[in-house]
Amino acid sequence: MCMRLIFVTRVHATKRGFVTVGDVVLILGAGPIGLVTLLSAKAMGASKIIVTDIWDVKLQTAKELGAHHVIKIEKGMEEDAIVAKIVELLGEQPNKTFDCSGAEQSVRIALKVTKSKGIVVLIGMGQLEQTLPLSSAIIREVDIRGVFRYSNDYPIAIDMVASGKISVKPLITHHFKSKKLLKHSR
């Protein structure tokens, strides 16, 4: 149930970001939400995808799932250095950015690095109030969109998996008998 909801909401997120063939995509956060966003963006035709995270193991999984580049965010790294590294690896600014962590630094990077007239989709649930560089995003006409739920995206998500466009098998790490599911879900 949980993976199904994550998958459908990430399909909804990539639809909200209008990901299409040729897009250059940045995904901030490589947890389950970020990884499913990666799969969905790939299936929708993104030509370059870069993923950031603080954990090597998550970045390795992102590479295995098709990320073209990954960046490990180290403690104390300056935002502008991260922005520069993203642009260096991609050869350009991303036109679609998905923040999957909700961390203030991550949202700030999303707003700073996204190309003029690009789209930032905020998926991660962070603090209720954050200090963000909105003026820069407004001047560059960056659209900021939130995602909290999904609407009528089950058919698209099911079709993506059924057609083989997306394989969720690499995301399944454990199998439990239903009697033990509650114990292992904590």
Image (cartoon, rainbow, N blue to C red):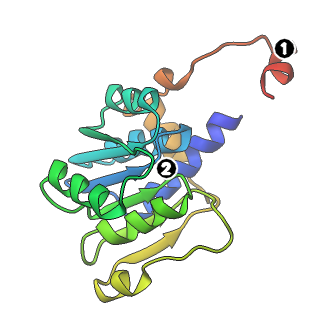
In the foreground, 75 or 177: 75
Q: Residue at x 29, y 46 (%)?
A: 50
Q: Which amino acid type is marked by label 1?
A: Lys
In the foreground, 172 or 133: 133
In the rendered image, the vertical position of residue 43 relative to residue 9, given as above or below: above
Mark number displayed over residue 11: 2
Residue 11 as seen in the image, left or right of residue 126: left
Residue 20 visible (yes or no): no
Q: Residue at x 38, y 64 (%)?
A: 109
Kindly indicate the quadrant of the structure image that contains residue 140: bottom left
Q: Which amino acid type is marked by label 2?
A: Val
The residue pinned by badge 1 equals: 180
Q: Residue at x 17, y 48 (%)?
A: 89
Residue 14 visible (yes or no): yes
Label 1: element kind: helix
Q: Residue furthest left?
A: 91
Residue 139, given in percent of the width and then of the height, sits at: 31, 89
Residue 53 as seen in the image, left or right of residue 114: right
In the rendered image, the vertical position of residue 36 relative to residue 183, given as above or below: below
